[in-house]
Amino acid sequence: MKGLFKSCAANESNPNWENIISRARPLYHRDTDIRSEFERDYTRIIHSNSYKRLKHKTQVFFSPENDHICTRIEHVTHVESISYSIANYLGLNTELTKAIAVSHDLGHSPFGHSGEKILSGFSKRDLGIPFWHEKNGLDFVDSIELLEDNERNKQNLNLTYAVRDGIISHCGEIDENGIQPRMEAIDLKNYVRPNQFAPYTWEACVVKVADKISYVGRDIEDAITLGILDGHLTELYDLLNFNRENRTLNNSNIIHFLVADLCKYSSPEYGLCFSSEAFSLLNKIKAFNYENIYFSNRLMPSNRFFELVLTEIYDTLMSCFDGKSAFSSIQLLQRFYPKLYTGFLDFFYSFYDYSSRSGSRFKNRVLFEDSSVSDFCQAVLFFISRYDG
């Protein structure tokens, strides 16, 4: 039923409203500002460098020559569109879903999930903790991404709790039908693994589902375009024969079926639900994609290339730490790797705890100490995860 979730929406009548809109500290205020809290989040996100870099980041297929193959920013746009349609029909806060959707993948590394796995290997070995893009995304919006305020000072994004929660809660496969939000506004630093907690708002639950809907069909379209599914099309047509009157194989039909089904069968009592038919189809498509696309032999050479590139960059940067100081050794990069030197030095300098910081325009969080090898390692991982790829 249309508007069925209106009483659960993230708005001022929601009993959790103060938690939903809370920030680490107040944003600067203009008397003439006409935007809501979530609209401010949305514009802060789309003006950030992490958002801009999404246009060059890998979704599934690396560096396609065909401009019509999906990149990370197109995926984010698809999620925004799908989540808006669902939230709007159900009566939820579309401003919040839009803000979560455009920010949900800001923490993705170069080279998609393959790059994420490689960086996680470095992190586990050298820091004892995994690297995962949901947590990295929260770290980026909390501590890494900087915007100038109305006095030209560099500040962290300082987003609302609901958007931050949506970022770190968005992932995890939908193995059970009926997603519902959790009740508690937990400290998001308590997350130690993906999908550990349910999202805090219904709007974040919508984005979590929309993320899955957005990629299953689009990845198939791209794989067909690139010839990766040659030899599997009969199997695919049989799999997707969910409407006997329309066997057209495209992303539009898949999305429409799943979105319409979700809106029909969802309720505040039972959660965001698909029918058994649609839920079974979604899981079958995902299984097909993993077997024939994501684990395809056609992608293996790219994965080996990704590991070579990221390992060389990581090892080169880590070699700069001499056990006492980072800054002096970083200078050694300048002769042979001038672009890498300039980029990393500027990045490290923005978050370094130096004594003259109080006189600068950097008003963001200090993250790194010059003499800490763990801080330096974390800085390298943050820096690499910003790369295009």
Image: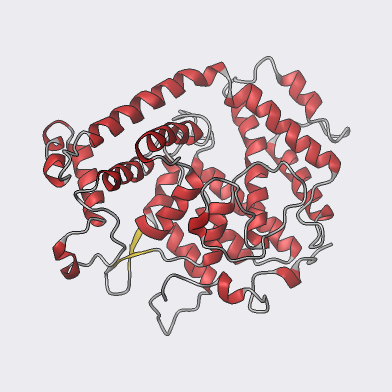
Q: Residue at x 55, y 59 (%)?
A: 165
- In terms of image quadrants, where is residue 217? top right
Where residue 42 sits: x, y (%)? Answer: 50, 63
Q: Is residue 302 left or right of residue 386?
A: right
Q: Quadrant of the C terminus?
A: top left
Q: Nearer the viewer, residue 319 or 46?
A: 319
Where residue 175 sits: x, y (%)? Answer: 72, 41
Where residue 86 sits: x, y (%)? Answer: 71, 56
Q: Is residue 151 left or right of residue 107?
A: left
Residue 106 visible to the viewer: no
Q: Is residue 369 left or right of residue 290?
A: left
Q: Is residue 211 left or right of residue 43?
A: right
Where residue 112 sits: x, y (%)? Answer: 48, 35
Q: Is residue 94 above or below residue 309?
A: below
Q: Residue furthest bottom?
A: 31
Q: Quadrant of the N terminus?
A: bottom right
Q: Residue at x 18, y 65 (%)?
A: 357
